[in-house]
Image (tube, rainbow, N blue to C red):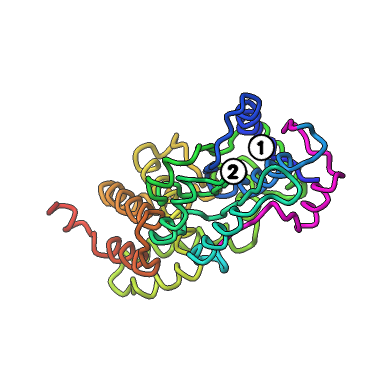
Amino acid sequence: MIEIFPWQTEQMQRLLLMHQQNRLPHALLFSGPRGIGLKRFALVFVMRTLCLSNNGQLEIACGHCKSCELFKGKSHPDLKFIEPEENGKMVKVNQIRELIEYVSFKSFSADTKIVIIKSADTMNRSTANALLKTLEEPPAQSKLILLSHYPSKLPITIRSRCQRIDFKPAYSESATAWLSEKLEHSKICPNLLLRLAGGGPLKAIELTNEDYLPYRHELLEDLDLLGKENSDPVKIAKHWNEFGAENTVSWLMRIISDLVRLKLCPKKANIMNLDLREDLQGLSNRLDLLKLIRGYEFILLKYKELGGAMNYSPQSILEEITLFWKNYDDSTLKSR
């Protein structure tokens, strides 16, 4: 039987208190960084809500009543799970129309019908508008749970009608201990992985994939190469996009932040990529501080565009970054 992760106790206690005080809203928005475990938390909460043997208490789910058995078999008639049909795609308007029809019918085995919408921030405006009426006038027995890593992408009309439950980056002792246990045979420091993963323990495990950590070396080489005349920024951006725009821009922000720190305080800088300190120091010595600062500001802006309400082309954003980095030479710096 699935349970919440150790770093999610506070959020579950908050929901328990709301339930005990009969204040659970019709719509909840769970938000947090990638790798924090939003889907699992939502599923545990739903299983406890639908359990027929816990007398309405959310502390536990029995695991063996008819409702729990249906849940474990992924066939519970009072739970609907919606997500983009493909990675990188949007939640579509027809999926929301199916949701509206689904919650309009009476529940089968419990007093509640629940819909979980994963990656809710991928809805475009027309899709969000289709959901809005149900949020404004929800059927009495329905509960909607929206999951989002980028809640700012959701229209304010959607956010304002949801009770928000936020999950902060997990740098706690419980998260570190959990990660250490999962990576018992790994040679990589759990604290380093957590820092590189932005406080997402599940993301930290992904970083042990053989492709992720070496990719940082490629980015360092590309940043150095972009400062040379014979570099091709469009070609480099295309390569970055193959790895994923979001991953690339996130890594670039961490790397350039480290470069700035090393430029300001070479010997005592507290950097994230501890294992790359020597390579980072070498590149930092070859770059102008103002270029690093302006570069970080520009990449942060592009990162917000990737996670913003507008659907920008990832390839275009990466090309803007490579062109900015290549053309922002010392003469440009002096003229600004």
Q: Earlier in the sequence, mark 1 or mark 2?
A: 1
Does 133 lie within the magenta span? no
In magenta segment, residue 74: yes
The residues colored magenta run: 56-83
Image coordinates of residue 132 in percent, x first then y, are 44, 51
The disc at residue 176 is 1
Give left or right: position of 282 versus 336. right
- Element carrying mark 2: helix
Q: Looking at this view, is 22 or 287 the one in front?
A: 22
Quick check: 265 left or right of 14? left
Query: Quick one: label 1, few (<14), some, or many (20+) residues within 10 Å?
Result: many
Residue at image position (28%, 71%) is 229
- Whole-percent x and y of residue 157? 38, 46
Label 1 with label 2: CB-CB less than 8 Å = yes
Task: In the rendered view, tell whether residue 181 sits above or below residue 230.
Answer: above
Task: Answer few, some or many: residues within 10 Å of disc 2's Cα (few below 14, many 20 plus, some between 14 and 19).
Answer: many
Asked if residue 207 shows in the view, the reply is: no
The residue type indicated by label 2 comes to Leu
Indicate the amino acid at tag 1: Thr
The answer for how far apart the CA atoms under marks 1 and 2 are is: 8 Å
Tell me the residue that label 2 is attached to. 194
Location of the N terminus (image quadrant): top right
Q: Secondary structure at mark 1?
A: helix
Q: Nearer the viewer, residue 29 or 214?
A: 29
